[in-house]
Amino acid sequence: MTRIKICGLNDAAGFDAAVDCGADYVAFNFFAKSPRFVTPPQAAALSARRPGGPSRVALLVEPDDALVDSVILALRPDILQLYATADRVAEIQARTGIAVWRAVGVATAADLPISANGATALLIEAKPPKDATRPGGNATAFDWDVLRGWKPEFDWLLAGGLTPDNVAAAIRVTGAPAVDVASGVESAAGVKDPDRIRAFIQAARGRAFVQAARGL
């Protein structure tokens, strides 16, 4: 079954919807330039609403040790999702003992990694536009056909430009074991829409799964 990560949660309605609908991962964004930015105490307060359940993921962009430590102390995440060099990822994983995902931008088949370079998993997404102020896919999907026949020996997630309307097709084309969405389940930048979260998970897994997760 395809695993699902809902990223950039910053309010109770979005967080509760992700948990209720059966997301595998709920993620908090600690990059100050993002419209989804939360502080470590804000993330901890949201997470405390529903102890247990999905794995908690902390998204960090080229963080220094002080930020990493403050996030770990407040949130106690299960996973760190990093925008950083492979060497820095390995360093943080060794120092913290926490699983680390590293984001990799892809435009063509030549960009596909052949190794996780020590990361627990890789997040595969579109390369950011040249004028982007934030890393990541920036709500843009790359050509999923480049993933046909790509069968890495490490875990990975597909991200970038996914929505309730295209996630099922993305899974069919790529065979992604997990998918990651942020802006695709929002009504405005940084504003999660519970109905779109529900629709996304339903499209990725089917209506019956979502109804079972919600106890219907």
Image (cartoon, rainbow, N blue to C red):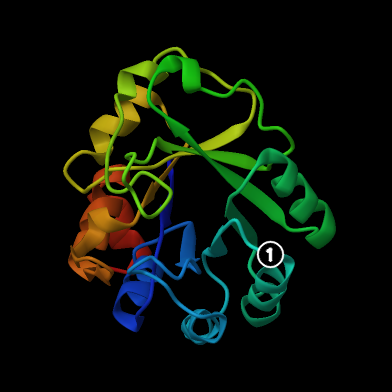
Q: Position of residue 131 (x, y in %)?
A: 31, 45
Name of the residue lying farthest toward the right: 95
Tell me which residue sits at (50%, 69%) in the image.
30
Image quadrant assignment for residue 44: bottom right
As shown in the figure, which amino acid type bears the numbered disc 1?
Asp
Name of the residue lying farthest toward the front: 131
Q: Is residue 37 left or right of residue 99?
A: left
* Disc 1 secondary structure class: loop
Q: Position of residue 113 (x, y in %)?
A: 57, 24
Image quadrant assignment for residue 130: top left
Q: Is residue 13 left or right of residue 147?
A: left
Q: Image quadrant for the C terminus? A: bottom left
Q: Which residue is mark 1?
A: 64
Q: Is residue 215 left or right of residue 149?
A: left
Foreground residue among 71 and 153: 71
Q: Position of residue 20 (x, y in %)?
A: 36, 70
Foreground residue among 215 and 171: 171
Q: Position of residue 95 (x, y in %)?
A: 83, 58
Foreground residue among 132 and 79: 132
